[in-house]
Image (spheres, grey):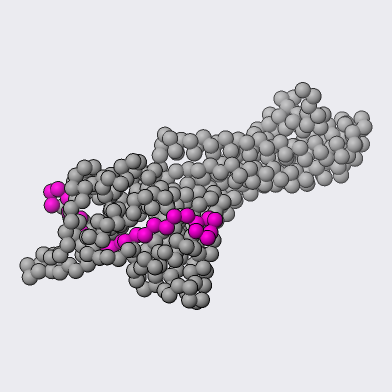
Amino acid sequence: MNVPLVLQVAYRQLFSRAHSGFLRTVSVLSICGLAIGVAALLVMDSFMTGFRGSIMDALSRINPSIVVTAPGSNELLESDLTFLRHLADQSPHLGRVCPMLENTAIASGRGGEVAGVMVRGVDWDDMARVTFLDELVGESYAHGLILGGPLAERLGVAGGDTLRLASTENAMLSGMGSAVVDTIISARVGSVVDMGIEDYNTGLVVIDLSTAQALFSSELEATSAGVAVVGTDADPVSEAASLDAALRDGYVNSRHQRFLSAQAFVQRHRNLFRALGLEHLAMTVVLALITVVALLNLSSALAMIALEHRRDLGVMRAMGASPGFVARASLLQGGLIGTMGSVAGIAFSLFLIFLANNVFQIRLESSIYWISVLPGRFQPEVAGLIAVCTVLACLLAALFPAMTNLSVSPSEAVRYE
């Protein structure tokens, strides 16, 4: 393969064994500095993205993309659900509507252990179409109630056991200080699963809608409704805003007699994601300073290389090399170091992320951080952007040494040779 002469000259001035070993060491250290800066940025971005993505994935496992409620925590009537389904049918990005009946209850296991839980009554077929419930529990999702592993361990139950649920709607304290409830039902445990988030694993029970109505002695259809978002290009936040506007318009124009509101489920935790975004930005700025320090080191290294090879460039210019050739050779030195540093940084970050995901997993306190393992999610587009910016910054750093080489005449460069 024919390598362009200007590239050969640039590489030789950086790494040739015919010249000072000190300059080769400086070149290698410049590449290592850039690689560390690029790797630090990519590893930080991967873990922040993984943390945010894991929480969003866990929230979407058993929660619909859009939640519709009536202000004041009022119940949803059958007419509300009918109107909501009508609006969903008119939108190309909205799918199945799933009514949900939620209320608090007391769960009791085999040994008499009790726990306060949130009971969510759903229609299994509808719920499987608005969430990832079917993927989470497999074919057994319609064969009994669903609860998380920590809650099942606390209550001493497993799949196939019977769990007693008592409504706290009309609970009272007796004169002896014990709780008195008026509705108690028994339900079979269908699946014990990992719901993804500690709060759900320790305090949520999903049951059939008819069972929830019997438990709460209620004929209510739902306290809220979930709406599926279909299409890979659909944004739940924008779709929720459009649905909310349609619900408001229906109420104002008397097409529906009750006021309803729609909200993307992730917006309920928007303060958390805003905090994560601010932390991400702050850490990016701090770690970017590492790359800035490496670029300053690169600039001094290139200036030193230019001084060391001034006579060589003078000889080439005396032999007919154009000023543009000399400038390109100097700029290519910065481009070579930037490219090598970026490639090495990306490879090192991939290695670290692989170790963190498969060998040395980073454990978190799930009761604090919601998730128990911190995953790394490498983003090729971010890596590409960082690599391009790094190479451009290296070319800019090489601009001053290139201009310095051009400012010296060939006769001055070879005067004492």
Outermost left residue: 176
Looking at the figure, which quarter contains the C terminus? top right
Q: Is residue 97 above or below residue 172?
A: above
Residue 96 is one of the magenta-drawn residues = yes
Number of dots carrying numbers? 0
Task: State the residue at coordinates (17%, 62%).
Answer: 183
| Residue 110 highlighted magenta (yes or no) | yes
For residue 150, say whether it is visible.
Answer: no
Q: Residue at x 15, y 69 (%)?
A: 172
| Quarter of the image with the N terminus in it | top right
Location of residue 341 in the rendering, given as x and y in whole percent from the top left corner: 64, 38
Overall secondary structure of the magenta section? strand
- Judge whether residue 253 can be spotted in this image: yes
Q: Where 197 sits versus 173, above or below?
A: above
Q: Could you tell me residue 170's position as x and y percent?
A: 19, 69
Between 211 and 300, the residue placed more toward the observer is 211
Q: Which residues fall within the magenta stretch?
A: 89-112
User: Residue at 88% across / 31% down in the picture?
Assistant: 315
Is 372 left or right of 405, judged from the image as shown? Answer: left
- 84 up-or-down from 302: above or below: below
